[in-house]
């Protein structure tokens, strides 16, 4: 009998584990080559896991909701294609302990032990204290119960337990007493962080007819990421109103031909992204990240574009090396990422590595917004709706009143490293590129 182990795939450089959302096949079901067997989720994106061989699903090694490390076997598939094989293997798995335990039973036994450790962790978790997937995985591996985990002193944001905290706990043999701090005392010139203050959300009173809606996994991640960003970066927002009449007229002129030639729509988003990449080259200190007391200046310009999903959630696919693309390339990439985002077909690497983000709030009819920085970036720009307005037009023969297409650009930036001068000049430069658009440009 030939067996094939379905392995939890590597979903990106920074992904170490994934959660099983749904099994698409049941034990005994036939599976074709490249047919999806289950759906998994990481803290970045959801995706399907296909089988590389045809056969029959013999055994599921994990249940829905289980967290599995990358590289671990998650299912056994018989390559013989016979459902009878599945029954025979299941019978072997049920042998008494005195008999030889087959490989499948050994794997299942290890999974059961892991689940026994994980069960109290999940059922008794304190909802007021957040534990990252990495910390939870270390706790499961080291067989640390939730009661023990709750005694670990956290040194992270809002008292969270970090990787260093739990490893120190393991090293001390489960002693919750804080370890000695071997870090030299900061000098009087160095910044001293204020003591961590644990914040408790206010209680919500329920009234008759109120509906309680459980957050889905993605909404929980978004909520945590937004709170973390506001706690990390002091946000400042600068606004500029741009006259994009020439740009609007040019797009109206070329969009029909582009649709006929390329088979795709030409939106304003690639235009905005091109203007932003040009401005980043003019002001490269916008394209940075903060790591402790150091600044990382990024060489590549990777622009994330916030995209709304049908579920109401938000995801930010990233256009890598956007400054190397022409308008046609940007338009095709934007359309492709947006379509696959809506259909949950993005790869984990396609939502990582961004160095600057743009969000088009104008698609919802909003004239401006104050976006939250997508950490670990230091700035984000919101593009408002393009509306017609009466405006003063300066000519060589005097000032005139005319109808112009106007839009607001909102630039939020991290005031730790981006001052008002840089943040303001950057958004002004983006507006300049949009206002000075060449109506005779080819695409």
Image (cartoon, rainbow, N blue to C red):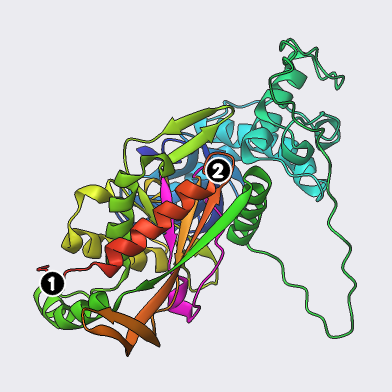
Span of residues in magenta: 354-377
Residue 22, percent from left and from top: 54, 59
Relative to 135, is 30 above or below? below
Asked where in the image residue 286 lies, by quadrant, the reply is top left
**Apparent side of residue 378 relative to residue 122 in the rendered image (left or right):** left
Q: Is residue 400 magenta?
A: no
Quarter of the picture holding the C terminus: bottom left
Q: Residue at x 71, y 67 (%)?
A: 214
Q: Residue at x 24, y 67 (%)?
A: 436
Residue 230, percent from left and from top: 65, 51
**Apparent side of residue 272 relative to residue 408 in the rendered image (left or right):** left
Residue 221, percent from left and from top: 61, 54
> Secondary structure of the magenta portion, mostly?
loop
**Apparent side of residue 286 relative to residue 146 in the rendered image (left or right):** left
Of the image marks 1 and 2, the number of the one nearer the N terminus: 2
Q: Considering depth in this image, is 167 or 232 the residue closer to the camera?
A: 232
Residue mark closest to the camera, 1 vs 2: 1
Q: Considering depth in this image, is 29 or 291 the residue closer to the camera?
A: 291
Q: Residue at x 79, y 37 (%)?
A: 159
| Tag 2 secondary structure | loop
Quote the CA–CA distance across marks 1 and 2. 46 Å
Numbered tag placed on residue 378 in the rendering: none
The residue tagged 1 is 262
Q: Considering depth in this image, is 341 or 300 the residue closer to the camera?
A: 300
Residue 328, percent from left and from top: 17, 63
The residue tagged 2 is 61
| Tag 1 secondary structure | helix
Asked where in the image residue 307 lies, by quadrant, the reply is bottom left
Relative to 172, is 2 above or below? below
């Amino acid at each position: 009998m030939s067996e094939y182990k379905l392995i939890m795939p590597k979903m990106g450089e920074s992904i170490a584990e994934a959660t099983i959302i749904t099994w698409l096949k049941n034990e005994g079901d036939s599976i074709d080559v490249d047919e999806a067997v289950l759906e998994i989720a990481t803290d970045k994106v959801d995706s399907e896991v296909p089988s590389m061989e045809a056969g029959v699903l013999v055994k599921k090694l994990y249940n829905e909701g289980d967290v599995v490390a990358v590289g671990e076997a998650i299912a056994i598939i018989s390559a013989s294609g016979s459902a009878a094989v599945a029954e025979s293997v299941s019978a072997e798995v049920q042998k008494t302990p005195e008999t030889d335990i087959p490989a499948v039973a050994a794997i299942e036994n290890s999974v059961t032990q892991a689940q026994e450790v994980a069960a109290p962790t999940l059922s008794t978790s304190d909802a007021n204290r957040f534990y990252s997937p990495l910390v939870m995985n270390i706790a499961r591996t080291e067989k640390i119960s939730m009661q023990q985990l709750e005694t670990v002193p956290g040194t992270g944001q809002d008292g969270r337990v970090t990787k260093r905290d739990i490893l120190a706990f393991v090293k001390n043999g489960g002693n919750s007493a804080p370890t000695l701090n071997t870090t030299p005392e900061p000098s009087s010139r160095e910044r001293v962080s204020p003591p961590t203050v644990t914040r408790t959300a206010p209680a919500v009173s329920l009234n008759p007819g109120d509906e309680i809606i459980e957050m889905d996994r993605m909404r929980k991640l978004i909520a945590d990421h937004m709170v973390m960003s506001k706690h990390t970066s002091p946000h400042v927002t600068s606004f500029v109103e741009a006259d994009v009449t020439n740009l609007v007229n040019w797009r109206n002129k070329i969009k029909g031909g582009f649709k006929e030639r390329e088979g795709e729509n030409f939106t304003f988003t690639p235009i905005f992204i091109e203007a932003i990449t040009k401005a980043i080259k003019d002001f490269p200190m916008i394209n940075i990240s903060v790591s402790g007391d150091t600044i990382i200046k990024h060489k590549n310009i990777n622009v994330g574009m916030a995209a709304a999903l049908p579920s109401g959630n938000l995801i930010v696919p990233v256009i890598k090396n956007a400054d190397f693309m022409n308008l046609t390339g940007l338009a095709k990439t934007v359309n492709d990422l947006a379509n696959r985002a809506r259909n949950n077909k993005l790869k984990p690497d396609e939502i990582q590595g961004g160095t600057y983000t743009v969000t088009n709030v104008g698609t919802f009819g909003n004239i401006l917004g104050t976006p939250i920085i997508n950490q670990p970036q230091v700035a984000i720009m919101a593009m408002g709706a393009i509306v017609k307005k009466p405006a003063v037009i300066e000519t060589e023969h005097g000032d005139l009143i005319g109808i112009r297409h106007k839009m607001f650009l909102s630039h939020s930036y991290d005031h730790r490293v981006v001052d008002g001068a840089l943040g303001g000049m950057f958004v002004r430069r983006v507006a300049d590129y949009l206002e000075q658009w060449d109506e005779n440009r080819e695409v």
